Amino acid sequence: MIRVIAFRFRRASLTGVAVFVLRARDPDRQRPFRIPWFPLPPIIFCGMCVYMLYCSLDYARMLTLLGAVPVAAGAPLYLLSRRPWRSAPAG
């Protein structure tokens, strides 16, 4: 349960960061919604998400380590699977 909550906080904080990225990439674009006091609400939102992510991971320290082991073991396998394989020459 803690891992699911931690994933949601991480995803929510990235959503807050996306507001800054999209506004920096295309500042002159018409927005359907104007954020009042623009930089302040997304900064507070991202800060609270990072704080709650830290608290949830700190609360479940050993479970966090147990969850990190399969991810660390799977990362090299994922990178290897993304590698283009050379096919044998036809003939």
Image: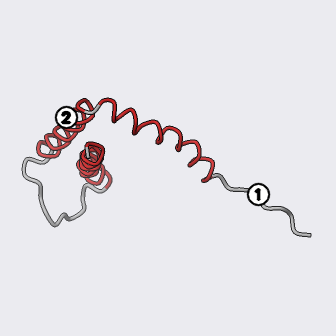
Of residues 7 and 23, which is closer to you in this image? 7
Q: Residues within 10 Å of mark 2 (few under 14, many from 20)?
A: few
Image position of 20 (left or right of 75): left
At a point 33% along the width and 35% down the height, the residue shown is 63
Q: Residue furthest bottom?
A: 91
Q: Amino acid at mark 2?
A: Tyr
Image location (x, y in percent) of residue 50: 23, 37
Numbered disc 2: secondary structure: helix
The residues tagged by marks 2 and 1 sit, at their Cα atoms, a distance apart of 46 Å
Residue 5 versus residue 86 in the image, above or below? above
Q: Looking at the image, is mark 2 or mark 1 earlier in the sequence?
A: 2
Which quarter of the figure has residue 53? top left
Image position of 50 (left or right of 71): left
Numbered disc 1: secondary structure: loop
Q: Amino acid at mark 1?
A: Arg
Q: Residue furthest right?
A: 91
At a point 29% along the width and 54% down the height, the residue shown is 22
Q: What quarter of the picture does the C terminus occupy?
A: bottom right
At a point 20% along the width and 41% down the height, the residue shown is 49
Of residues 42 and 34, which is closer to you in this image? 42
Residue 11 versus residue 54 in the image, above or below? below
Image location (x, y in percent) of residue 19: 24, 52
Q: Residues within 10 Å of mark 1 (few under 14, many from 20)?
A: few
Image location (x, y in percent) of residue 44: 13, 40
Q: How many dots with numbers?
A: 2
Of residues 37 and 8, which is closer to you in this image? 8
Image location (x, y in percent) of residue 74: 53, 44
At a point 25% along the width and 29% down the height, the residue shown is 58
Q: Which residue is mark 1?
A: 86
Image position of 38 (left or right of 75): left
Of residues 75 and 45, which is closer to you in this image? 75
Which numbered circle lies on residue 51? 2
